[in-house]
Amino acid sequence: MTGDPLSEVFGALADPTRRAILARLAEGEATVNELAEPFPVSLQAISKHLKVLERAGLITRGRDAQWRPCRLEPEPLREVATWAEQYRRYWEGRYDQLDEYLQRLQKEKSDGQQGEDSQRP
Amino acid sequence: MTGDPLSEVFGALADPTRRAILARLAEGEATVNELAEPFPVSLQAISKHLKVLERAGLITRGRDAQWRPCRLEPEPLREVATWAEQYRRYWEGRYDQLDEYLQRLQKEKSDGQQGEDSQRP
DNA sequence: CGGTTTATCAACCGATGAGTTAAGTAAAGC
DNA sequence: GCTTTACTTAACTCATCGGTTGATAAACCG
């Protein structure tokens, strides 16, 4: 994605196969073949998905002989939850004082319309 | 993205510009020009971002003369939060009985290794 | 009316994504 | 030591993404 960690994570999650892999890993470690088994794509495709998940920090991979067990790394998911929670008051339809203030300020700006070094050429 | 709603939402969120637009909209409705102002890209680029956000259900657009005020639509964000919350017990390091059972089952499978109609050719 | 402001649509471009097949690496097993 | 098993890397295809410029639509303003 764009490079920043959160974009990397969201980008990794924007694929149902990868989300399914995470769901599977929530049941415990698994090898690449085990992870690939349910999907109608090549093992190489899964290998790529795993690399994406790894880059995003969503999984880590160990070594056990020729197997490469994958493990769920939940920290980025916590960050996603935290990020989304910021908006909780919006989906709960509740707005605290600051929000109301900001909304009122916003409204006045679109009515009164002046000040604020805007981009008038 | 792949078509399913959640992928659409995650895909929309996988861009810092679009997340910044959402953050701005959390302060209240805004027009396209207002949203574009902070960014070093063309208005058309922002218009495209808005279309992506709209397709994902993250914003709606009204009509006020020649202006098209954008509004934050928090429902998909709630779904994101809910989705991520599924993994809460993992980042809290706590596992309930079912999880332990699944993990044990998983471990036994990788040790004992038989039964389970797997993909042996 | 003509011009300005606000925003979208269309065509293009380079980069990236998700998939493929084919070849390469690495450890185990006989 | 050769084969098998597990997985990765490489090279390619094709679609989509994020950005651009240029043209267009629609509503207001004088």
Image: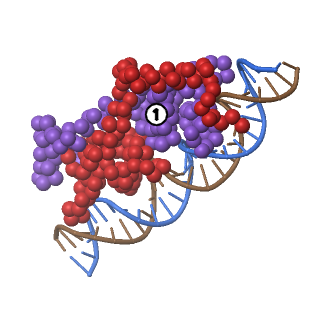
Chain colours: A red, B purple, C brown, D blue
Q: Using residue D14 as the reference point, say whether residue C10 is left or right of it.
A: right
Q: Residue at x 47, y 49 (%)?
A: A1
* Disc 1 residue crowd, few under 14, some 14–19, many 20+, Cα 10 Å: some
Report whether residue A101 is seen: yes
Q: Which residue is mark 1?
A: B23
Q: Using residue A113 as the reference point, say whether residue B75 is left or right of it.
A: left
Q: Residue furthest front?
A: A115
Residue type, label 1: Ala
Circle 1: element type = helix
Q: Residue at x 57, y 39 (%)?
A: B38
Q: Residue at x 47, y 38 (%)?
A: B19
The chain containing the residue under callout 1 comes to B
Q: Using residue A25 as the reference point, say whether residue B75 is left or right of it.
A: right
B60 or B119: which is nearer to us? B60
Q: Residue at x 65, y 36 (%)?
A: A119
A48 or D24: which is nearer to us? D24
Residue D22 at x, y = what percent?
A: 77, 41
Report whether residue B8 is seen: no
Vertical order, B25 against B62 (above or below): below
